[in-house]
């Protein structure tokens, strides 16, 4: 059974640090990481935490302690990673649509570079030739309407270089004498079917034959965690077994034995995160009963943005009778967290906990409505550490310049 924080721990944190509050559970993050490691212990695998899910420096340091590497999508994430103690070689920089200077900055810092368009690949090759290796992000065009659906690997996606442009890539590589040390796909989030990974992998193994200096094949992420009862979790053990088998067969056939890289974000931190809010108002309308909480999509945007489902529990009244509520925020804009949700009777002042809030929660928060961003707390060995203080009023004016 996976480790979870108890209601009492969440209530204590909320009492001590106030709400709204993000609470992260260090041991659960470790469990998730170790589960992946165990599942893939049959082959040479490395895990790069996709830190855009949650970048608090303490989370990065925790990942480093656990033995993870880091996947970064901006130069600022790269710098955060270095500050957290990662070696440049432990960082993979996978930007999309950034300017050449940002790619060069990554090179100057000595991190692994992943390039996802031919224009930048050409510029990189012209400037650096084989003096600095690059990984190439490919778009496999794994299409919905076949036997699987993927959201960032399809033909309309802006990500990666088309798998059909291998000839063109080869021309650029040959002409500029580029050293390609890896190939990469990230087919999207929340892939339910293990076979989808395997199809992508087979494609990558074929493609690897075009690049003689390949040291690693990066299969990105897509590990799914369950959000509601009966929801699917990626079977990482089945996946690990199949991936390792495929790599063993590849080695047998070709004599090549590249490392396998993955970039889990959500899988490592989502379930370790809780978002605790307070019920401000119970409002009966002709249509429903609203619970108005002291937060909104300015703090947790996933329900509005992705129609994501987050389990909500009344941690102050877990034994109360179940009632049906519509849970909304306090933003002047529709910001519904949940419709028609069965929750133990909510009284004004009760704390509600949102589960599965570690990934893309705080990270996507904003100051919309001039509201303050919430605090973040890390619970480690049952001790709560404040790892980010709540915004203060002055933060709203921080970069503003009064000219009138
Ligand atoms: C976002 C992202 C990930 C992580 O995806 P999750 O669904 O959070 O695991 C991995 N790799 C790249 C390149 C990404 O952009």
Image (cartoon, rainbow, N blue to C red):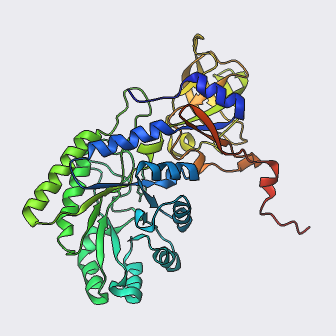
**Nearer to the camera, 373 or 251:** 251
Q: Where is residue 83 in the image (x, y as percent from the top left)?
A: 56, 62
Name the quarter showing ligand 1. Answer: bottom left
Q: Is residue 50 visible?
A: yes
Q: In this view, does 71 lie to the left or right of 325?
A: left
Single out the residue that lies furthest toward the left: 253
Q: In which quarter of the image is the N terminus?
A: top left
Q: Quadrant of residue 261?
A: bottom left
Q: Quadrant of the C terminus?
A: bottom right
Q: Is residue 398 left or right of residue 236?
A: right
Residue at horizontal 58%, vertical 11%?
A: 319
Q: Position of residue 194 (x, y in %)?
A: 25, 44
Residue at horizontal 36%, vertical 42%?
A: 34
Q: Position of residue 23 (x, y in %)?
A: 59, 37
Q: Position of residue 197 (x, y in %)?
A: 26, 50
**Nearer to the camera, 47 or 175:** 47
Q: In which quarter of the image is residue 13?
A: top right
**Nearer to the camera, 66 or 123:** 66
Residue at horizontal 40%, vertical 82%?
A: 124
């Amino acid at each position: 059974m996976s480790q979870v924080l108890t209601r009492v721990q969440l209530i204590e944190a909320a009492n001590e640090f106030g709400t709204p509050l993000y609470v992260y559970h260090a041991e659960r993050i470790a469990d998730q990481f170790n589960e992946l490691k165990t599942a893939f212990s049959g082959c040479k695998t490395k895990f790069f935490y996709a830190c855009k899910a949650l970048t608090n420096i303490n989370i990065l340091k925790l990942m480093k302690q656990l033995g993870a590497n880091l996947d970064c999508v901006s130069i600022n994430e790269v710098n955060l990673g270095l500050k957290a103690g990662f070696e440049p070689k432990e960082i993979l920089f996978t930007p999309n649509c950034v300017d050449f200077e940002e790619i060069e900055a990554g090179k100057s810092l000595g991190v692994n570079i992943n390039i996802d368009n031919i224009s930048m690949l050409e510029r990189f090759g012209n400037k650096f030739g084989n003096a600095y290796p690059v990984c190439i992000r490919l778009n496999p065009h794994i299409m919905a309407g076949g036997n699987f659906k993927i959201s960032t690997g399809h033909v309309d996606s802006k990500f990666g270089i088309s798998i059909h442009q291998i000839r063109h890539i080869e021309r650029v590589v040959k002409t500029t004498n580029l050293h390609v040390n890896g190939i990469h796909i990230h087919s999207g989030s929340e892939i339910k079917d293990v076979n989808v990974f395997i199809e992508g992998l087979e494609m990558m193994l074929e493609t690897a034959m075009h690049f003689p200096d390949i040291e690693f094949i990066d299969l990105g992420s897509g590990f799914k965690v369950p959000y509601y009862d009966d929801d699917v979790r990626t079977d990482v053990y089945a996946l690990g077994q199949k991936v390792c088998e495929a790599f063993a067969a590849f080695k047998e056939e070709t004599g090549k034995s590249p490392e396998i890289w993955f970039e889990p974000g959500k899988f490592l931190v989502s379930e370790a995160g809780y978002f605790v809010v307070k019920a401000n108002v119970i409002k009966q309308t002709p249509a429903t009963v609203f619970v108005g909480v002291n937060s909104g999509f300015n703090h947790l945007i996933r329900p509005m943005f992705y129609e994501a489902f987050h389990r909500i529990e009344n941690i102050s009244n877990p034994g109360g009778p179940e009632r049906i509520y519509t849970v909304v925020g306090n933003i002047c804009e529709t910001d519904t967290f949940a419709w028609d949700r069965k929750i133990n009777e909510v009284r004004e002042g009760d704390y509600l906990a949102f589960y599965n809030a570690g990934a893309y929660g705080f990270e996507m928060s904003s100051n919309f409505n001039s509201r303050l961003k919430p605090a973040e707390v890390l619970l480690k060995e049952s001790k709560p550490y404040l790892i980010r203080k709540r915004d203060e009023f002055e933060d709203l004016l921080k970069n503003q310049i009064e000219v009138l």
